[in-house]
């Protein structure tokens, strides 16, 4: 018999804020979100786990009028008013040169830096899985800060990359509007799959 | 001036449980985790957002001796003792036929079912991004229930698929050990990237 170390459970209010009551937001109030709060989002999200601690996700926060003017033309037209109304917009990108950091973030296996340098396909496997994984953490971290998240896939990734990531290393994967909702949700929540459509047992 | 709708913030204790204090677990106590608790994990995770509400992730919970005997040979050898010690192991998989559910989960655009049926490459784009995204939600939902998660990428996906998903529709993407830690973490937390290596501003 082994002795377990009890972990804290998260209460109903926090579960509602993160999962069961939270809604994707499409229209934001003009209440500001300061840079310290945006920094706090990452301070939470960065601790959740990634494969071999490789942490390939990068975050660009766009919140100035100049930044918005550079970003909006690269969003699908129906998405532009959403991001225009959001006090901050996060562009989540994966860093194709994540392996440069390996000696510092994975000191137990520094040789993986050279391994990944020589294997671009294996770098792609890391970024394509762990980028979206970290995006999931990021969205829940936004909510943990008492903010609404509006993730959007409709944008010209190559256009954003050229405008904001001219070095060619970062590739944008998701745009997330961040702020306070302008009002209650405008339509009912879309249905989730029934448990029996998702969960099986063995 | 618009009026914002205040959202709840998540307190320090819940943030610690989900993000800042939580650790990946490699060795589990033999404290049982019942099926109701495993169901509760999905009851949280399923509400977090996916592209067009498409929800491509599927969850197989392996927790019987027979199920473990079928699963363990397909894990990389160093991972077998971890999953053997865990009272439950979740195999997260993406469903390549997620579009069958579209008339029910996206009733505003039922015609997308036919669109995706005719475009396997676009189905792959949905599963390859939203599968890992939902895996991120899943890992944090495990923690919200007061359980430790041990996500592992080292397994033979084709072998697991053949054993558990013989219809060929589901493709395993992550294995997550679930339970109560057998003891305190055995090594210090690996370092996270500095904010200035990740976050940029515009």
Image (spheres, coloured by chain):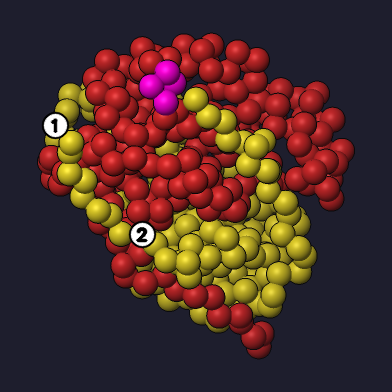
Chain colours: A red, B yellow
The residue at which mark 2 appears reads as: B9
Give percent across and percent down for residue A91.
47, 29
- Identify the subunit bearing mark 1: B
Name the residue beneath numbered marker 1: B108
Left or right, A1 with reference to A190: right
**Highlighted magenta segment, given as a residue range:** A64-68
Above or below B119: residue B135: below
Please identify the quarter of the rendering in which residue B45 is found.
Answer: bottom left
Foreground pick, B10 / A30: A30
Is B80 placed left or right of B89 in the picture? right
Any part of residue B27 in sight: yes
Please indicate whether residue B43 sits to the left or right of residue A58 in the image.
left
Lower position in the chain sequence, tag 1 or tag 2: 2
At horizontal 53% and vertical 11% (from top left) the residue drawn is A162
Q: Residue at x 76, y 36 (%)?
A: A101
Residue A159 percent location from the top left of the image: 46, 11
Kindly identify which chain the residue marked by label 2 belongs to.
B
Residue for point 50% across, 37% down: A132
């Amino acid at each position: 018999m082994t002795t377990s170390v009890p972990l804290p459970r998260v209460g109903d209010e926090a579960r509602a804020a993160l999962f069961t009551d939270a809604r994707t937001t499409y229209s934001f109030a003009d209440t500001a979100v300061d840079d310290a709060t945006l920094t706090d989002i990452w301070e939470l999200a960065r601790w959740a786990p990634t494969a071999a601690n490789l942490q390939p996700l990068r975050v660009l926060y766009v919140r100035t009028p100049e930044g918005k003017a550079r970003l909006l033309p690269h969003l699908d037209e129906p998405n532009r008013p959403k991001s225009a109304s959001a006090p901050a917009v996060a562009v989540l990108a994966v860093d194709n040169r994540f392996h440069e950091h390996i000696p510092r973030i994975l000191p137990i296996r520094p040789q993986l830096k050279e391994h990944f340098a020589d294997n671009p396909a294996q770098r792609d496997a890391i970024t394509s899985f762990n980028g979206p994984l970290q995006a999931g953490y990021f969205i829940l971290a936004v909510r943990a800060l008492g903010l609404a998240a509006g993730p959007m896939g409709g944008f010209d990734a190559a256009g954003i990359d050229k405008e904001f990531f001219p070095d060619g290393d970062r590739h944008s994967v998701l745009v997330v509007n961040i702020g306070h909702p302008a009002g209650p949700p405008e339509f009912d929540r879309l249905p989730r799959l029934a448990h029996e459509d998702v969960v099986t047992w063995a």
